[in-house]
Image (cartoon, helix red, strand yellow):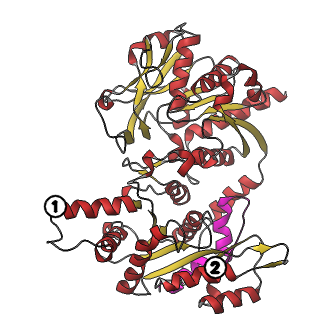
Amino acid sequence: MAFSKHIFVTGGVTSSLGKGIIASSLAKLLQSRGFSVTIQKFDPYINIDPGTLNPYEHGECYVTDDGAETDLDLGHYERFLNVPTSQANNVTTGRIYYNVITKEREGAYLGKTVQVIPHITNEIKRNFLLLDDTGKYDIIITEIGGCVGDIESLPFIEAVRQFKWEHGSENVIVVHLTLVPYLKSAGELKTKPSQHSVKQLSEEGIQPDILICRSELAISSDIRKKLALFCNVDFDSVIEALDSDTIYGVPLLMQEEKLDERVLHKLRLPLDRPAEMTAWKEFVRKIRRPKEEVKIGLVGKYVELHDAYKSIAESFIHAGAINECKVNIAWIQSEKLADEQNLYLLQDLNGILVAPGFGERGIEGKIRAIQYARENQIPFFGICLGMQCASVEFARNVLGLKEAASVEMNPQTPYPIIDIMESQKNLTLMGGTMRLGSYACQLKAGTKVHAAYQNLLIQERHRHRYEFNNQFLEDFEKMGMICSGINPESKLVEIIELQNHPWFVGVQFHPELKSTVANPHPLFVSFVKAVLSEAKNLKR
């Protein structure tokens, strides 16, 4: 089996510079040249996975087909590459230590003292190679979370140093992302933070092969020479990364900077296949020059941190481009809508999406938003908890079951419209125990969702503990709320759809997790199309 080429992406100076977007952009360029590429993320926190983290802490939890709860950067990887990721694509310090401690308890180390070096670093290196062992990839890009110099990142950086020494500089390179800030008072860009960042990396035994410099202003030739000289990299390997109006413009900026060419040159890979980015450029053109605009309210409890709903926001960009329409998102805190006086927040919306989440906070506001959408014929999309809230709203206000609720919010409700799944009732561990990953859904012919998918059997990703209570399904369908999608094995209601409404769909799964640039999710495309149609009708 041929050894894959490996690219490690590290970051310095500050967090949130965009390592994930840079890694995704580089991967896209290499993929467009015909290479098979994947990306993995190594996070320095001690949680086994981000599944139990508050979205305010870490943004959304991204779920893969195989049921892994992962970092949101894996969403970027999939959206750019249109290739599914897996458990092997996201590894945390917690998982590394868990594996090592488990082996130690099993007696795998033959009585040796277990230490960070070599046992932890060896386990990290073993995980570097998990995707390599599949034999499917020419190039594997590994993003190292955090900043160089962080205490928690040190074992990962040491593992990268060893890995590069073991496999050679023609097979392993390090791309370091740093910041070149502009000081307004001095009127110039400053290179010193980048110099210190590279110095820190060098002290830990790694010399970066390529330096990518985030900057608000263009980096002059003189500044590039200075960075090359004092950071000990080739002049041509100092890459400018200017701010972009859209993350999907970054691959094109990196192509202009010849980042892919420098990487291929360093890895001794052929340069004879030019990057084919025509479709990507057309997608970016549609984002930048929309023919129409709509306003969709995203009602959720974590709206103060937009990354908590990152995949939904990106899905709207994908669906908007297909419809040549810009989707302007109104971020609406669901708690505010619990007060009827705040319903004015919904008045100028062309569509309403009620977002997923957990817990009681903000539930009544979500239910009010759904009632408003239903009664005013506003296109509505409910995802996971949003679908469950739509079911409760319908039971209360159409079926007349005023005390209807989800048992998650009210365990004593006489009308448990949403009940805990049988398989979840006796679980005591919270981490990784939900219904996770890809499951089948059988669609009902002639429905809006069937028209959207153009298929009767689909696969979608899930992350939930509660489900629609089928005891109430017959009453729902008599009053016009039909089950338009069901799991063929468990008979779990996956999709509800309101008849005699422009577009009112609730789904138990997370369609946003499968939307990519190359394949925008059909439900988002259909929803945005309906929103656009209704908006045009209002103008007439």
Q: Is residue 282 magenta?
A: no
| Quarter of the figure with residue 512 | top right
Question: Is the residue 347 above or below the residue 97 in the image?
Answer: above
Quadrant assignment for the N terminus: bottom left
Instruction: From this view, report whether residue 410 is shown above or below residue 522.
Output: above
Which stretch appears magenta? 239-267
Q: Is residue 503 left or right of residue 404?
A: right
Q: Quadrant of residue 382?
A: top right
**Closer to viewer: mark 1 or mark 2:** 1
Residue at 67% over, 87% down: 227
Q: Is residue 142 visible?
A: no
Q: CA distance from mark 1 to mark 2?
A: 49 Å
| Residue nearest the viewer, comparing 325 with 69 | 69
> The residue under label 2 is which amino acid type?
Lys
Residue 5 locus on image (x, y percent) = 42, 77
Position of residue 426 measured from the top left corner of the image (x, y, whole percent): 28, 30
Q: In the figure, 213 relative to 367: above or below? A: below
Residue 310 on image: x %, y %: 59, 48
Q: Give the residue at mark 2.
A: 258
Residue type marked 1: Glu
Q: Is residue 367 left or right of residue 444?
A: right
Residue at screen point 45% across, 67% down: 152
Q: Which residue is mark 1?
A: 106
Mark positioned earlier in the residue sequence (1 or 2)? 1
Total number of numbered discs in the rendering: 2
